[in-house]
Image: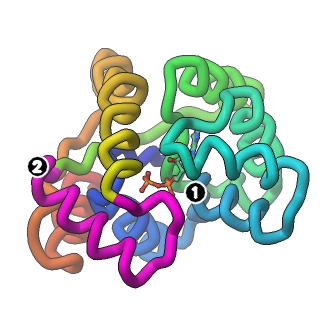
Amino acid sequence: MRLIFIGPPGVGKGTQAKNICAHFGIIHLSTGVILRNEIKQMSSIGQSAKTFIDAGQLVPDDVLLKIMYERLTQENCYNGFCLDGFPRTMPQAEGLDHILKNLNQSLDAVVSVEVDEEELINRLVLRGITSRRTDDTHDIIRQRLQVYKKQTEPLIEFYEERDLVKTINGVGEITEITERILNTLI
Ligand code: ADP
């Protein structure tokens, strides 16, 4: 099973991606987690990514494509994966197509999780209190939502043209939402 999770910040796609990966026994690749680890390790990727992340901007496409190329060509991804936070721009989506074509692989579905904007902001402000994520502050959250609308949301249409998109209502209990996703995938 090869999946992409798309949705605005705060929609719960990381939590759901984790559950779905556990169900199918596939690898969960979260670019947010990968980048935050690079920052923790103070690698050169991490140091340049931090400026973008803290400003609520996207990290440049070439950096993400390099990271994802390295992960997706590893053996543990051969049986399937779930991409959480990637692709986030059209060039990333095109780059992903290219990587998968070279690996002779194709996507099974794109899970688009939806929640209304007011609820998203509430969730993110709450998360900021406990997560200590430097990008979960009110102004940066608004900025990230704008970036999502402008740069990432158009990808839904791109994948709709290939009939891959499963739209999921992201409001409800976590396990209930996982069931909704599983039901669209089987
Ligand atoms: P969220 O979905 O809550 O915004 P993530 O943990 O997925 O959070 O990402 C946090 C930040 O990491 C993003 O705001 C962005 O700066 C950076 N990032 C993650 N994935 C990508 C990507 N595919 N392209 C560019 N930047 C990314």
The one of 155 and 102 positioned closer to us in this rendering: 155
Please say if 92 is above or below 167: above
Q: Position of residue 179 (x, y in %)?
A: 20, 70
What secondary structure is marked by label 2? Answer: loop
Q: Earlier in the sequence, mark 2 or mark 1?
A: 1
Q: Is residue 91 left or right of residue 101?
A: left
Q: Is the C terminus in the top left, top right, bottom left or bottom right quadrant?
A: bottom left
Residue 158 appears in view: yes
Instruction: Check the image and name the residue furthest to the front.
Output: 139
Task: Please state the extent of the stretch shown in magenta in the rendering.
Answer: 115-137
Query: Which residue position holds label 1?
Result: 32
Query: Which residue position holds label 2?
Result: 116
The residue at 64%/37% (across/down) is: 59
The one of 186 and 63 positioned closer to us in this rendering: 63
Please say if 56 is above or below 120: above
Q: How many marks?
A: 2
Three-letter amino acid code at disc 1?
Answer: Gly
Disc 2 from disc 1: Cα separation: 22 Å
Q: Is residue 5 left or right of residue 157?
A: right
Three-letter amino acid code at disc 2?
Answer: Asp
The residue at 77%/70% (across/down) is: 40
The residue at 18%/65% (across/down) is: 122
Q: Position of residue 165 (x, y in %)?
A: 28, 35
Q: Is mark 1 within 8 Å of ligand 1?
A: yes
Where on the picture, by quarter, is residue 157?
top left
Does residue 28 belong to the magenta stretch?
A: no
Residue 164 appears in view: no
| Mark 1, other Cα within 10 Å: few <14 / some 14–19 / many ≥20 | some
Q: Position of residue 183 (x, y in %)?
A: 19, 60
Q: Are discs 2 and 1 less than 8 Å apart at CB? A: no
Does residue 136 belong to the magenta stretch?
A: yes
